[in-house]
Amino acid sequence: MATLLLIDDDQAVRDLLEMLFSGSHECHTADRAEQALQFLEFQDYDVVITDVSMPGLGGVEVLQRVRQRDGATPVIVISGRPDEYQEAVLEMGAFAFFAKPFSSQWNRSECEWCNCRGADCQALCALMILFLALRVLRSSFRFFVPEPGMS
């Protein structure tokens, strides 16, 4: 069983990620970067998923700390401001970047991965597929999953 650290100041996002992954993985959640950094002092994680913008320290600091401590741990960054953060965090070593909010445009069509419908489905399915790939590959590939319509 993999251990994940899920970091976001938005309770709904944390709950959604935890719901997605907790059935088959141990999930620890943090509502701010400072709390996550305390967890990282005492626990090794297989994957860290962090928001960028939070009160106080942010996901960039979490990414830097994880890279310093253990360069092999994949860090997936999520942000509502992809134009501002995507390129920078990928250059800093983030394994992947996901834009949020997970677009409601996906409501209009079936998810290509699981054939379900829902505002959050496609992004969450993409996270799950990426997580599974992370466990196998642990490679240096970098991914960006834009909102529909972004080029």
Image (spheres, helix red, strand yellow):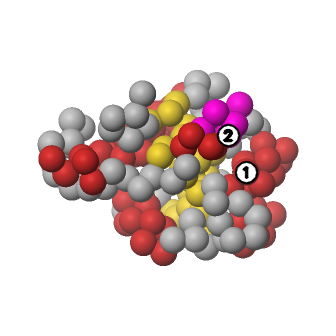
Residue 38: x %, y % from top left = 78, 69
List the residue tagged with mark 2: 89
Which residue appears at 41% of the width and 56% of the height?
Answer: 101
Residue 22: x %, y % from top left = 42, 64
Please tell me in which quadrant of the rendered image residue 87 appears: top right
In the depicted structure, whether residue 95 falls above or below residue 127: above
Q: Is residue 124 left or right of residue 46?
A: left
Residue 29 in view in this figure: no
Give yes or no for contact between labels 1 and 2 (Cβ–Cβ under 8 Å). Answer: yes
Badge 1: how crowded within 10 Å, few (<14), some, or many (20+)?
many
User: Is residue 126 part of the magenta span, yes or no?
Assistant: no
In the depicted structure, whether residue 40 falls above or below residue 128: below
Quarter the C terminus occupies = top left
At numbered mark 2, what does the secondary structure look like: helix, strand or loop? helix
Between 61 and 23, the residue placed more toward the observer is 61
Which residue appears at 19% of the width and 51% of the height?
Answer: 107
Q: CA distance from mark 1 to mark 2?
A: 7 Å
List the residue tagged with mark 1: 60
Residue 35 in view in this figure: yes
Which residue appears at 58% of the width and 28% of the height?
Answer: 142
Q: Which residues are magenta?
A: 86-91
Which residue appears at 48% of the width and 75% of the height?
Answer: 11
Between 55 and 7, the residue placed more toward the observer is 55
The amino acid beneath tag 1 is Val
Q: Which mark is residue 18?
A: none
Q: Earlier in the sequence, mark 1 or mark 2?
A: 1
The amino acid beneath tag 2 is Val
In the depicted structure, whether residue 15 falls above or below residue 141: below
